[in-house]
Amino acid sequence: MNSKIATLARRVADIVAECNYAQSRMTTLKTAPDAYLTVAAHAPDDYAEFLFRTSGTLLHEPDASHRAHGQLAG
């Protein structure tokens, strides 16, 4: 009986962690400076604009061994 409760608790914790990751990722994407571009293929006009567009939070992509174990970017 205890193992079933522990398994259920782990699943709930995994769901909450995934929802937390999705919420923080959506917040990052919604508030990124380049999210407000009207033309998607428009390149920056100068270096200052390039720096502004890339001033948002950048994701750390895990290496292949961690991705194989299901670790998300972040």
Image (spheres, rainbow, N blue to C red):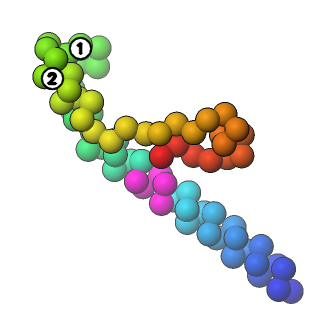
Residue at 52% of width from left, 36% of height from top?
Answer: 61
Q: Position of residue 67 (x, y in %)?
A: 65, 40
Whether residue 38 is visible here, answered yes or no, is no
Q: Quadrant of residue 16?
A: bottom right
Residue at 14% of width from left, 13% of height from top?
Answer: 45
Q: Position of residue 21 (x, y in %)?
A: 49, 54
Q: Main secondary structure of the magenta part?
A: helix
Disc 2 secondary structure class: helix
10 Å crowding of disc 2: few (<14), some (14-19), many (20+): some
The residue under label 1 is 42
Image vertical order of residue 26 relative to residue 10, above or below: above
Q: Residue furthest bottom?
A: 1
Q: Position of residue 24 (x, y in %)?
A: 40, 53
Tell whether position 22 is magenta: yes
Disc sitting over residue 25 in the figure: none
10 Å crowding of disc 1: few (<14), some (14-19), many (20+): few
Q: Which residues are magenta?
A: 20-24
Foreground mark, 1 or 2, reads: 2
Disc 1 secondary structure class: loop
Q: Amino acid at mark 1?
A: His
In-front residue for pair 15/61 = 61
Left or right, residue 28 beside residue 34: right
- Per the model, the C-alpha gap separating discs 1 and 2 is 11 Å
Image vertical order of residue 51 relative to residue 29, above or below: above
Do callouts 1 and 2 mark residues in contact (Cβ within 8 Å)?
no
Q: Quadrant of the N terminus?
A: bottom right
Along the polypeptide, which appears first: circle 1 or circle 2? 1
Q: Amino acid at mark 2?
A: Glu
Image vertical order of residue 2 relative to residue 70, above or below: below
Q: Position of residue 56 (x, y in %)?
A: 27, 39
In-front residue for pair 38/13 = 13
The residue under label 2 is 49
